[in-house]
Amino acid sequence: MLREGLGVIGVAIRAEPRVFALAVLASALYAAMTVGTAQVLGWATEDVVLPAFAEGRTTAGALSGAAAAILGVALLKALGVAGRRFFAGLMQYRMQARYRRAVTRQYLRLPLAWHQKHPTGQLLSNANADVEASWAPLAPLPMAVGVVAMLVIAAVSIVLVDPALAAVGFLVFPAIAVLNLVYQRKLAPIAARAQQLRAEVSEVAHESFEGGLVVKTLGRETSETARFAERADRLRDANIAVGRVRGMLDPLLEALPNLGVLAVLVVGSVRLESGALTAGGLVSVAYLFTLLAWPIRALGWVLADVPRSVVGWRRVRGVLDAGGSLPFGEREAGGDGAARLEVSEVRFGYADGADVLHAVSFAAEPGRTIAVVGPTGSGKSTLTSLLVRLVDPAGGNVLLDGVDVRDVRRGGLAASAALVPQQTFLFDDTVRGNVTLGLDVPDERVWEALRLAQADGFVAALPHGADTQVGERGMTLSGGQRQRLALARALVRRPRLLVLDDATSSVDPQVEARILAGLRDGAGADTTVVVVAYRKATIALADEVVYIEHGRVAGRGPHADLVTRSPGYRRLVNAYERAERDTGDDVGLNDEEALR
């Protein structure tokens, strides 16, 4: 554990060598002046105080000289303290910021499949609590390194004054070494457990907040509170266990140097009476031994943080070393105008189950609209993820204008293709900010996208128009309004391929029809559209339908032809139509019920 902890510290020193050097120099200045205080006190005792008592008088010059020496040492000591704390803090915060950025960049690089295996709460803990824990020893580290100089200087000074007293006092060091060894072995597993529980508490809290609507509507506040309290209590107990072990270490680290001072005073008084030691020498040695408590304490602070640092570092490295990031090529995604999409023998399966898609093949000519239809679990959403390369297929190819999407340069596919998923996410920002997401486009283009998404009317009616704050996750808007803003967000980028994964399910059927008609009329020449659809009126607007059943293409062609040729397709779309006619919408009907 100690060896691994020193390795973590070495990473920080190599990353910030100049800042670390300045912190250590400041700490060394503090250490030297602390030892200098002992020398000054010894000199003042021997040459100023004792002669004054012996002669009954002293001079202003002697007193002024002693005061000036003590004041000068004190000022340099204060300068060392200030410099050490500033540069140590600078080093720690720089490393924390650096690795928070590194973890976040890695999150963005890793594929969706990796994120699906790691809860959001754990990821938040990796980027926050684990990074902080990794670099916790950096705050006391420069002091510990700097006071090693004080330890060496004090030890040499003690030996030079009286070797016998030095031998007595130095017996404290083996005891401290044994104490630290026991401490590391006891604290390491407890610190690992506490760090894991921090991630679990963050995970439960995130789930409860994200599912706030479900919790409240189903009256689950009490159970969620109990679930969080149970994890929080376990974290509390783990932290108390860590504190208990550390609480045993600190008093012992305090006691051992003091026991050494006591032994020095006892032996030193005997040697003083025998004439083997002067009074000034005894004062100097006793003071130097009291100073040894500082190096020991500083080293103890570093060692106390090492187990937690190692655990945090392991968890951070687990993210940084994670494999499975999507490799990119160097090719462009194509030219201008609508894209040609070709899906060839695509196969895909999640790691914990059988294949979801089996040899799926179809093509979408530039400017055409393709409707993907199928029952629940048939692989429609998985297919949309493959089209925009959120994941890569286990077999087969997805081609955009004849270029395999795996060969496209980083950022190239995002510039040509856009996905509007089932679950709409809006940031706590203005309408305009949610549509542009940092894209530098004129206001006319924003309103053009809003018009195509049939969102311009309700946005204009908001209190501040496009500058209205929508609240966290867009909670001030209805589900249909959020979906239309998400669609506008995709349209403002003028994608050559637009993929809609049931992106208008919360929108009124008449509004949905106007949206799709607007896409065909307003953007049809420049955009190829693939839409996962359920409503019969929506499906009928498509140029071609791809009917997927059990992960396979069970039929392709115009809607009217498929109704005639495919009994399964006919039953499915007719069931959708009946449900919409009976309820006024298709909300609440799952595909199995439709098929029945």
Image (tube, grey):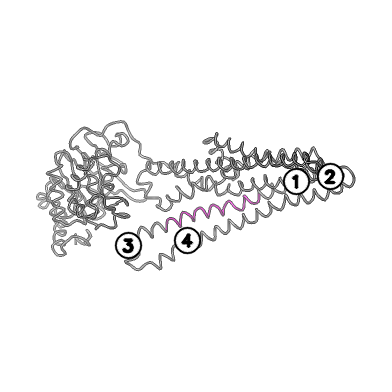
Name the image quarter holding residue 390.
top left
Q: Nearer the viewer, mark 1 or mark 3?
A: 1
Q: Name the residue beneath numbered marker 4.
A: 231
The amino acid beneath tag 4 is Arg
Name the image quarter holding residue 339.
top left
The amino acid beneath tag 3 is Leu
Q: Quick one: label 1, few (<14), some, or many (20+) residues within 10 Å?
A: many
Between discs 4 and 3, the one toward the N terminus: 3
Residue 454 image offset from top left, x and y in percent: 17, 51
Between discs 3 and 2, the one toward the N terminus: 2
**Gap in angstroms between the C-alphas marked 1 and 3:** 65 Å
* Element type where label 3 sits in the image: helix
Q: Is residue 581 above or below residue 36?
A: below
Q: Residue furthest front?
A: 60
User: Is mark 4 in CB contact (under 8 Å) with mark 1?
Assistant: no
- Of 462 and 242, nearer the camera is 462
The disc label shown at residue 57, or none? 2
User: Is mark 2 in CB contact (under 8 Å) with mark 1?
Assistant: no
**Gap in angstroms between the C-alphas marked 2 and 1:** 26 Å
Query: With 513 as the anchor, is 492 left or right in this view?
Result: right
Q: Nearer the viewer, mark 4 or mark 1?
A: 1
Q: Main secondary structure of the magenta part?
A: helix
